[in-house]
Image (cartoon, rainbow, N blue to C red):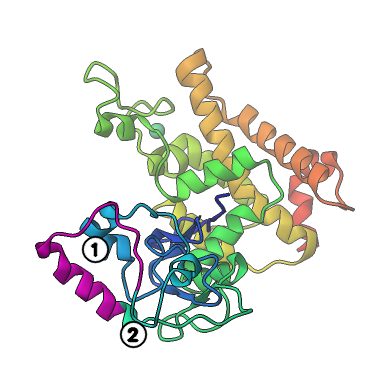
């Protein structure tokens, strides 16, 4: 059985690597430095697992590993074949040549300082106290440790993924935050769009379509954001990027259901802008900011109403009385 204790790093910069233990694969943070704590040796694979020193014996002694006929054997099985404290039986498929003996000596020397078995104690993964704390390794402890390294990014990732909106909407918000939206400029840079394809914004047709332009800076998009914020009596400066937008959005502290509406707004606007852009590009629709603003309010109202228990506002409260919502702030 293979178990993958996989951590989503939420778009952060954590480097992950795969670690093997007991025939299972774990995806761990390279900074976390898990290590194997030897118990009865039953779960530890002698050659594959990093139980003795900083590398696994398979990588440390490749010629000897290739000669072994018991590549999958556990540490406990290898120890059971010993005839005395120093006489290991590695089960090689042939007698060793002279030039292979130094490797065996080096292996025996390493094993002489290896951890001993503890009968009745199960082999397990533990954190390295020098780098990552203490206690047994688990998916939850890996998550706790890794999120502690995310810093400000953790706030944004929670802002995105803890929103009560459809996953496709949140995923698009995440793409926009990471500047991975497949705009004309993005696709031109990748070589997917040829030189005969216009890189200009479908809304204004005067500026190359980058993510920041299409979603924020284009006069068309800006008119939508202005409609959203003027209803709440807010004046602002246009942010440079979606990341700046999210940081500014989070700086406003609201409470209860008003906070839920506020935190959902940017994702609905971003997703609706992009969907409208696609309708214009692929279905020959014409940019229409009035209709789009109405559609954004309808989507916001229906999604929040459907996903938040005891949501106190009706769909018409949000669609027809947008300006009145601010009175609850
Ligand atoms: Zn534009």
Answer whether residue 72 is magenta in the image. Answer: no
- Give the mark nearest the N terminus, 2 or 1: 1
Q: Residues within 10 Å of mark 1 (few under 14, many from 20)?
A: some
Q: Is residue 238 visible?
A: no
From this view, report whether residue 273 is shown above or below residue 110: above
90 inside magenta stretch: yes
- Pinpoint residue 269: horizontal percent, then vertical percent: 59, 41
Find disc 2 in the rendering and name its residue.
113
250 and 186: which is toward the camera: 186
**Which residue corresponds to the image point at 61% horizontal and 79% vertical from the top-left?**
121
- The residue where tag 1 is placed is 61
Image mark count: 2
Residue under the image location 27 percent in, 32 percent down: 190
Looking at this view, is 28 or 171 the one in front?
28
The quarter of the rendered structure image containing the C terminus is bottom right
239 relative to 297 in the view: left or right: left
| Picture quadrant where residue 120 is located | bottom right
Q: Please tell me which residue is depicted at 50% across the width and 62% down the height of the picture.
A: 247
Is the residue marked 2 within 8 Å of ligand 1, measured from its CB?
Answer: no
| Residue 247 can be seen in this image | yes
Q: What span is colored magenta in the figure? A: 88-110
- Expressed as whole percent of the image width and height from the top left, the position of residue 68 reads 32, 55
- CB of residue at label 1: within 8 Å of ligand 1? no
């Amino acid at each position: 059985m293979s178990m993958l204790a996989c951590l989503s790093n939420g778009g952060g910069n954590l480097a992950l690597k795969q670690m093997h233990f007991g025939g299972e694969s774990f995806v761990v943070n390279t900074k976390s430095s898990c290590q194997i704590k030897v118990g009865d040796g039953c779960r530890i694979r002698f050659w594959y697992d990093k139980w003795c020193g900083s590398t696994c014996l398979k990588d440390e002694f490749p010629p000897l590993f290739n000669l072994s006929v018991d590549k999958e054997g556990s540490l406990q099985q290898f120890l059971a074949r010993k005839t005395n404290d120093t006489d290991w039986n590695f089960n090689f498929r042939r007698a060793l040549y002279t030039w292979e003996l130094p490797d065996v000596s080096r292996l025996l020397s390493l094993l002489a300082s290896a951890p001993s078995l503890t009968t009745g104690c199960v082999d397990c993964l533990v954190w390295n106290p020098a780098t990552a704390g203490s206690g047994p390794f688990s998916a939850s402890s890996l998550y706790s440790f890794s999120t502690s390294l995310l810093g400000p990014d953790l706030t944004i990732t929670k802002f995105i993924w803890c929103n009560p909106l459809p996953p496709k909407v949140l995923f698009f918000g995440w793409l926009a935050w990471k500047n991975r939206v497949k705009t004309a400029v993005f696709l031109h840079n990748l070589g997917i769009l040829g030189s005969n394809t216009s890189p200009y914004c479908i809304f204004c047709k005067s500026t190359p379509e980058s993510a920041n332009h299409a979603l924020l800076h284009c006069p068309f998009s800006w008119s939508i954001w202005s409609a959203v914020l003027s209803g709440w009596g807010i004046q602002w400066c246009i942010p440079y990027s979606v990341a700046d937008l999210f940081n500014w959005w989070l700086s406003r502290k609201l409470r209860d259901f008003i906070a839920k509406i506020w935190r959902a707004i940017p994702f609905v606007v971003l997703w609706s802008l992009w969907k409208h852009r696609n309708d214009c590009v692929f279905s020959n629709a014409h940019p229409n900011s009035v209709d789009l603003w109405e559609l954004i309010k309808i989507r916001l109202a229906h999604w929040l109403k459907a996903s938040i228990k005891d949501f106190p506002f009706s769909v018409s409260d949000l669609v027809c009385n947008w300006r009145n919502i601010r009175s609850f702030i």
